[in-house]
């Protein structure tokens, strides 16, 4: 009876088969996505676990209160001190200088690209800017000590000629200093701020701009008083990423900031960041049971908590300014 | 699908003379002409979206633009505040003369920003700014250099009252505008447009995103506003046009087919195409 089977209304069967095929494919894709999500959670928890676990021996020797409040970080001394504050100060001061450069410069370029630049110019400038983000940071580090820092030294010499009192305390800017490292780090971060902020502003619906132009506003007013506030949640995301990049940046500060843990907020001095310390400590071949080696994980844990804090702050900011247009 | 119109119905209307008697001998009120569109054509690049249109707009009256989707109503409306200047490749031909100053709105001598200062617009979708209710209404006032807390407050209140929104928002002027309902947001946009005391207010299907109750409120509002300002309203809702307007222009494929008093258009149109459209046979 082979004929009978071929004459039965066939079209329904492949149709159903195709449907179930689609559903299967949907399942597989869903499964892969879930796997990716689980994987990233797994990695993050893995990192946290290692950091916590590996810093336990450290905290058996060093009192955590002392660690968090101590103003001296001298792991290589005969009588080592493990107060994290100088490293935190170095991290925060380089980050602050970097943000003071990256946020205004990045935001202004983003506003210009999104609201003023002709489409053709934007299509050229934006990829170029994004290319800057691909330059290895070690290159930026050498850029800092071979160009930016010497220039800043000249600038500083010129500035203090007007302030004799400053001259007594700080006669010159050292080659390795927070200011130069921070400025270069800021330049490195500009493309991140700019690209994300520009995306956020371009996503603002045209009808909001038309509402503003329709009231008689010019481009500048529309950009600053309507588009920027409307995009602020996305801009805040850009700033959060900038902070994370700055706090976690390693090579620039390791090369250009001086690697001297000093508890100061003065950007004219050398400093050491948490990341730069970790690089320095990892490069020496310390035995694993050495307290200096273990301090790497305590420092890493501190860095992790700081970054986490900034990210939570950023998420809160984004929620606060999310617009439902 | 749209039926192809009979050829003779596409003949353009004669140009209205400014300050002439309103159309229809039975006209109860004589309005002076506020603006006159003369042989206006508009091009998106090479596409001619408005074709040689001529019609008057009377002061302190509501003129409705009706016609099937894509016939050029929005395009014509947006000529009045030079909105098309925001995008490249757009071109006006002809004139929109604004009285009494006799300035040609779409002419090279008129500045788009000045025209937008004098002609306000309410959009199809409510588009309040990401600011407080107060700052939304104050936006145009600040642009015009109105300073001083008390004057701003007085004029914001006046505009919100004018838009029938004051009672609903007077206790939360500092709250964000996005907390309002859709209908309230649209009335906020009307208040924003009214606050600057424009000569003309343009409405582009202002109720198409709203529910029937919110729509009713906006229609009542437009009815009140006609005593104070010249209104142009685009609508594809024929009941709305007949309810709120004094004059109606029917457009089709970029051309102005018929212009008359609203009562005349809806009871006894002179063009068969108009008759077909208002009786719902296409569109
Ligand atoms: N930005 C634009 N560029 C090119 N063509 C457009 C643009 N906007 C509208 N059009 C065209 O112009 C014609 C009129 O559109 P529109 O004025 O929006 O019609 P309506 O408001 O009557 O529905 C339509 O054919 C539409 O496709
Ligand atoms: Mg339209």
Image: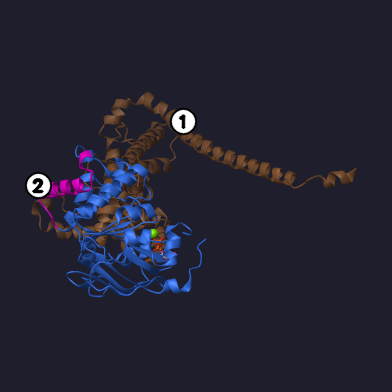
Q: Residue at x 42, y 55 (%)?
A: A136
B98 to the left or right of A186? left
Q: Which chain is represented by blue in the image? A: B
Q: Is residue A177 visible?
A: no
Q: Which residues fall within the magenta stretch?
A: B145-167
The residue furthest right is: A1
Say left or right for B250 vs B137.
right
Image quadrant of residue B120?
Answer: bottom left
Q: Residue A98: x and y, percent?
A: 29, 50
Q: Which residue is located at x 29 percent, y 27 percent? A: A66
Comparing B89 with B167, the one in front is B167
| Residue at (19% x, 72% y) in the render | B102
Toward the viewer: A86 or B56? B56
Tell me the chain of label 1.
A
Q: Secondary structure at mark 1?
A: helix
Helix, strand or loop at label 2? It is helix
Residue ID for mark 2 = B150
| Horizontal and vertical percent position of residue B60 | 21, 59
Q: Residues within 10 Å of mark 1 (few under 14, many from 20)?
A: few
């Amino acid at each position: 009876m082979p004929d009978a089977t071929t004459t039965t209304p066939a079209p329904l069967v492949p149709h159903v088969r195709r449907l179930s095929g689609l559903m299967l494919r949907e399942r597989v894709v869903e499964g892969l996505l879930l796997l990716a999500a689980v994987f990233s959670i797994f990695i993050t928890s893995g990192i946290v676990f290692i950091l916590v676990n590996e810093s336990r021996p450290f905290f058996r020797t060093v009192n955590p209160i002392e660690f968090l409040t101590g103003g001296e970080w001298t792991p290589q001394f005969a009588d080592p001190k493990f107060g994290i504050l100088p490293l935190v100060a170095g991290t925060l001061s380089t980050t602050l200088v970097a943000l003071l450069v990256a946020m205004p410069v990045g935001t202004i370029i983003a506003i210009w690209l999104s609201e003023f630049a002709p489409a053709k110019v934007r299509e050229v400038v934006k990829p170029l800017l994004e290319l800057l983000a691909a330059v290895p940071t070690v290159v930026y580090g050498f850029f800092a000590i071979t160009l930016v820092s010497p220039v800043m030294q000249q600038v500083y010499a010129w500035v203090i000629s007007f302030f004799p009192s400053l001259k007594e305390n700080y006669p010159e800017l050292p080659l390795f200093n927070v200011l130069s490292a921070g400025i270069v780090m800021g330049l490195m971060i500009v493309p991140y701020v700019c690209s994300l902020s520009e995306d956020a502003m371009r996503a603002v619906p045209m009808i909001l701009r038309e509402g503003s132009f329709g009231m008689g506003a010019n481009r500048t007013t529309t950009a600053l008083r309507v588009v920027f506030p409307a995009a602020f949640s996305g801009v805040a995301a850009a700033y959060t990423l900038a902070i994370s990049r700055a706090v976690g940046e390693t090579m620039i500060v390791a090369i250009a900031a001086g690697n001297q843990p000093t508890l100061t907020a003065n950007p004219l001095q050398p400093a050491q960041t948490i990341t730069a310390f970790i690089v320095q400590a990892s490069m020496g071949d310390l035995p694993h049971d050495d307290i200096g080696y273990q301090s790497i994980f305590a420092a890493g844990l501190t860095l992790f908590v700081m970054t986490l804090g900034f990210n939570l702050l950023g998420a809160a900011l984004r929620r606060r300014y999310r617009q439902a247009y | 699908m749209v039926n192809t119109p009979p050829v003779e119905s596409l003949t353009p209307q004669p140009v209205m003379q400014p300050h002439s008697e309103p159309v229809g001998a039975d006209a109860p009120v004589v309005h002076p002409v506020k603006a006159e569109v003369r042989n206006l054509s508009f091009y998106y690049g090479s596409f001619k979206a408005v074709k040689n249109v001529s019609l008057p707009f009377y002061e302190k009256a509501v003129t409705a633009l009706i016609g099937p989707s894509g016939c050029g109503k929005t395009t014509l409306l947006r000529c009045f505040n030079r909105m098309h200047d925001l995008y490249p490749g757009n071109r006006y031909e002809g004139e929109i003369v604004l009285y009494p100053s006799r300035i040609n709105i779409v002419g090279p001598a008129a500045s788009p920003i000045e025209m937008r200062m004098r002609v306000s617009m309410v959009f199809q979708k409510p588009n309040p700014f990401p600011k407080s209710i107060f700052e939304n209404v104050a936006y145009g006032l600040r642009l015009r250099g109105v300073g001083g807390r008390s004057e701003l407050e007085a004029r914001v209140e006046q505009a919100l009252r004018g838009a029938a929104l004051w009672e609903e928002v007077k206790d939360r002027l500092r709250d964000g505008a996005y907390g309002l309902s859709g209908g309230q947001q649209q009335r906020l946009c009307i208040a924003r447009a009214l606050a600057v005391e424009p000569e003309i207010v343009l409405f582009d299907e202002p109720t198409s995103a709203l529910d029937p109750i919110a729509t009713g409120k906006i229609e009542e509002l437009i009815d009140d506003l006609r005593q104070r300002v010249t209104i142009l309203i685009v609508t594809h809702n024929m009941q709305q046009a007949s309810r709120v307007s004094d004059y109606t222009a029917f457009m089709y494929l970029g051309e102005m087919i018929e212009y008359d008093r609203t009562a005349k258009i809806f009871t006894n149109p002179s063009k068969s195409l108009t008759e077909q459209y208002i009786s719902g046979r296409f569109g």
